[in-house]
Image: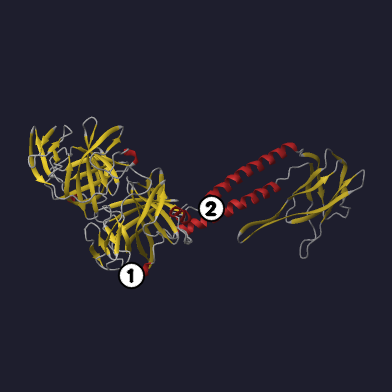
Amino acid sequence: MKAFCPNCGGGVEFRFGNTVQTTCGYCQSILVRKDADIRKVGQVAELPPSMSPVQIGTEGQYQGQAFWVAGRIIYDWEQGRWNEWHIVFQDGRNAWLSDAQAEYAVTRAAPFPSAGVTPDEFFAGRKVAIGGREFTVASTTRAHYRGVEGELPFEYWDKNDVTFVDLRSTGPDFATIDFSESPPLLFFGEAVDFAALKLTYLKQGGGADEPKAQASAINCPNCGAGVEIRAKGQAVTIACTNCAAVLDATTPSLRLLRAAQDAQKFGQSAIPLGAKGKFEGEWWQNIGYQVRSITLDNVNYAWREYVLFNDFRGFRYLTEYNGHWNDVKPVKHLPTETTAGGKRAMSWMGLTYKHFQTATAKTDFVLGEFPWRVQVGERVGADDFVSPPYMLSAERTLNEISWSHSEYTSAADIWQRFALKTPPPRAEGVFANQPSPHQGSARSAWTTFAALAALLFGSLMLSRMMQGNREVFAQRYTFDPNSQAEASFVTSTFELTGRAANVEARIESDVSNNWVYFNLSLINQQTGQSIDWGREVSFYEGLDSDGYWSEGGRNDTTRVGHVPAGQYYLLVEPQWEAQPGGSAVASPVHYTLTLRRDVTVSWPYFVALILLLIPAIVISVRGLAFETARWNESDYSSGGSDD
């Protein structure tokens, strides 16, 4: 529908059938239509600059349907500014594309299930069930309406301050309650990636390889030095790189928020402000640097954070503590509460993250640009959950809970991405989500051990099957220590056949509270060669104040190796003599002497098994020591690792 502006006569067009409000492109009058009647209801104030690549006329796709950007509503709040873009699909349906700090979401209006609710009922962390779905209150925002442009599906122009409640779920879905009306307005939606929207006709060209935001400069009101603004329109706070004064980036003159900080106390940024690094194929610029700390048991632990900015992807962060680096991204949907090992845990994207630490984080120093109202001395509650090499972190204030996901990254990798020439700092100690260098080695060592142990066991079984293990002689004898007759004797002849192999001699006796020594000689009948050895059999038992006791054994087994085939006999010489102070008379000893040929010897296999165990155990112990060092830095240090 084409018409003329009732204020200036300029031509205006209502391109979409459900458009109720539009803005005159000539005089900036806000026009509302009712049937064929068009009237002016207000005037658009000067709109703040927008660094969003989206503009009226941008086209894109969502869930397989094309859409057009028809208009927008602009809001300010204490942590920045965002746009609500009115989009119209091919089938005429309306939706909203939220663009806050280059994070995008698509929402659609839905009936509010109940009336009479107020913003005070929604506090950060509260569970809320709406439309059959469960949400958690992520934030309550008091926003200031700044203006409108383009076409809207309803009349919206005379607002002032508006309260929004953002609800997050454990999936991509979220909801927003808009208290600008009574009853409140409800919007359901989901977070979307910039690339997934396939946006065209963007203001800045549609996603070039390097960031294209033009830096601007203005003098610092504290020291007069030039302050370069790299994320104009997105930065909320700037800390002067010359005097470290904290400035309000949302005011044209950079209003002074805090006087100069002691920059020397906190050291220099390892990554220069303005440096560009490539992550996931895209360029990100370091625009901000801050030092934060926690205090535990009266000990202060400080770390450094870097704010990275991309015109089309928004913000991500790098953190560094004692040379340990993490690549940090905001989390778009909430993790699920669970337990692991009896401790708090979070489940997210198929992984379980164990609770590591709860603390209060304090901002000590800032430099450069930040997409929120950063304040030196600000404190937030922080919880860290780890699943190396990843970490989930929650930061809580009275009105907001924000989650982020970190991945442990080596300093060498960071230096390569930013092409830094100085040597990277060396990592000290063990960090919360640092992957164990022994984890893969331990798994590999135990896998190798299992394979070799199976091979060893198979060799033992094969040896048992292939060896003869034949009984070649067995006879029962009696030795009477009190007899005056010659005790030694020779056995009958027996034959050892086959290849040269071992011979096992076993003595099974009924000796009790006594001992007998046996000299044994295995003699080849044809050659006269002999193999000599001796064995003692002793067994003692009794009762005392501690009860029954025993020592020694009634039986003995020994082997001689590599005995050639042939006819053999055994010379046996039993010996006994009375011990000093003992009885001069001993009871006869009955014993059985058994010889076996080509017997499988198992102990070398068990020795080999133990030797195979040593590397796996050593590597596992090292891994356990690493995990112990990790968890000694946590809230569970007294218990050590639960892995």
Position of 31 with respect to 231 (left or right) is: left
Which dot, 2 or 1, sits closer to the camera?
A: 1
Tell me the CA gap for discs 2 and 1: 42 Å
382 or 22, nearer to the observer: 22
Q: Secondary structure at mark 1?
A: loop
Position of 106 with respect to 613 (left or right) is: left
Where's residue 316, x and y in %? 35, 51
In the figure, residue 268 lies in which quadrant? Answer: bottom left
Query: What residue sits right under mark 1 in the picture?
Result: 262
Say above or below: 578 vs 480: below
Q: Which mark is residue 438?
A: 2
Q: Amino acid at mark 1?
A: Asp
Position of 111 with respect to 441 (left or right) is: left
Where's residue 226, x and y in %? 29, 63
Where's residue 51, x and y in %? 27, 49
User: Which quadrant does the N terminus fall into?
Assistant: top left
What residue is shown at x 58% (from left), y 53% (from top)?
617
